[in-house]
Image: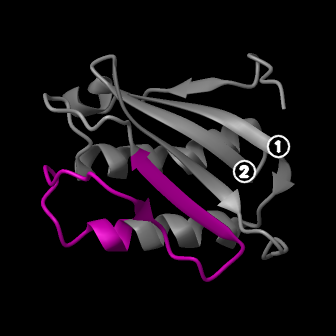
Amino acid sequence: MAINHTDVTTVILVNDAEDERLVTTFVPDGDKTLGIYDVFVPIMGALCEIAPHPSTYRSDGLIEGLQGYAGAICILPVFPLRMNPPYLEYRWIVRAIARIPAYMLEQRRFGNIKFDMAVDGVPIAFGALDRLPGKSPTQ
């Protein structure tokens, strides 16, 4: 699928200095739709996985949201792994995940997306929220 650059949205929420440092760029990924639970349940699952850890905890592996519904979220660090700051820390993941519903509401579409995360202009991660193969959207 060719990317239509009018479909690419960069989300920067300016609530505090930390928000200003993170830029999350979203791109629709195909035309699959997701039910509202297929979006919010994976987000909540990922947040529950992250919650027990400090915000500065470094992630150097897969962050995956709960897969009880048709949707699943996955975030991976850029490779090779960064040896200098900024790192993929849980604080950035939480902020990026929080931006997903805002993006979807702005687009008036709950569907598959891909996204990139950059802190201070440095790419740190990429991810996706997708409908799992063979699953129908949950209403």
Point out the tag, 1 or 2, that comes first from the N-terminus: 1
Between 100 and 61, the one lying in front of the other is 61
* Amino acid type shown at disc 1: Gly
Q: Give x and y (percent) for residue 55.
A: 17, 53
Q: Are marks 1 and 2 in contact (CB under 8 Å)?
A: yes
Q: Which mark is residue 22?
A: none
Between 19 and 114, the one lying in front of the other is 114
User: Residue drawn 70% across and 66% down?
Assistant: 36
Please name the residue that numbered disc 1 is placed on.
30
Q: Looking at the picture, does residue 54 appear above or below residue 114?
A: below
Q: Looking at the picture, does residue 139 appear above or below residue 104?
A: below
Q: Quadrant of the C terminus?
A: bottom right
Q: Looking at the picture, does residue 90 appear above or below residue 16?
A: below
User: Residue drawn 39% across and 59% down?
Assistant: 62
- Rounded to the nearest whole Å, what is the CA distance between mark 1 and mark 2? 7 Å
Residue stretch in magenta: 47-76
Please name the residue that numbered disc 2 is placed on.
112
Question: Magenta segment, principal secondary structure?
Answer: loop
